[in-house]
Image (cartoon, rainbow, N blue to C red):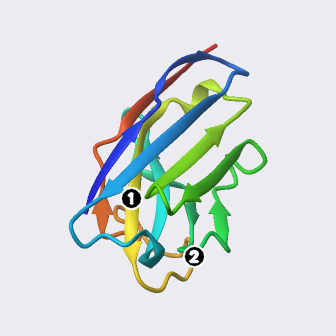
Amino acid sequence: VQLQASGGGLVQAGGSLRLSCAASGRTFNSDSYVLGWFRQAPGKEREFVSTITQLGGNSYYADSVKGRFTISRDNAKNTVYLQMNSLKPEDTAVYYCAARAGYYSGPVYAAPFYGMDYWGRGTLVTVSS
């Protein structure tokens, strides 16, 4: 499974960005994978941001982004999105998408892998004040 994130960039505080992550692989079936977003700020541990279950029935958010970020997925395109609104300087980080096959209990798994099986390379989001 390969994951390619895109959409990062520089934005002013209060602005918006939309991240995309395209998944691929010879045996990849989007309907079988939980998809999610995680981030790592400079000098900090990677942290959970949001995940969405296989058919989009359940989504989870970190408290720090709840109400500002929205995760969605298009299984026909094997793509997961993260719409980020009302961005703050503390949202500055490298954002990684990740995938997990099979059952998911929600954001109960520990760092650094948070129960995810595959990781993309990340896209940098910088929010200026």
Give whichever of 75, 56 is nearer the camera. 75
* Residue corresponding to mark 1: 98
Q: Going by the image, does 36 lie left or right of 50? A: left
Q: How many residues crowd around disc 2 within 10 Å: few (fewer than 14), some, or many (20 or more)? A: some
Residue drawn at x 68%, y 49% is 70
* Front disc: 1 or 2: 1
Residue furthest front in the image = 76
Residue 58, placed above or below residue 78: below
Residue drawn at x 51%, y 29% is 92
Q: Looking at the rendering, in which quadrant would you find the N terminus?
A: bottom left
Residue 95 appears at what percent x and percent y?
43, 41
Q: Secondary structure at mark 2?
A: loop
Residue 89, placed above or below residue 66: above
Q: How many residues crowd around disc 1 within 10 Å: few (fewer than 14), some, or many (20 or more)? A: many
Residue 45, placed above or below residue 56: above
Residue 16 appears at what percent x and percent y?
66, 27
Amino acid type at image mark 2: Gly
Q: Going by the image, does 8 lie left or right of 113? A: right
Q: Picture quarter containing residue 24?
A: bottom left
* Residue corresponding to mark 2: 106
Residue drawn at x 47%, y 86% is 103
Q: Going by the image, does 93 lie left or right of 29? A: right
Residue 115 appears at what percent x and percent y?
39, 73
Q: Picture quarter containing residue 56?
A: bottom right
Q: Picture quarter containing residue 118?
A: bottom left
Q: Are marks 1 and 2 in contact (CB under 8 Å)?
A: no
Amino acid type at image mark 1: Ala
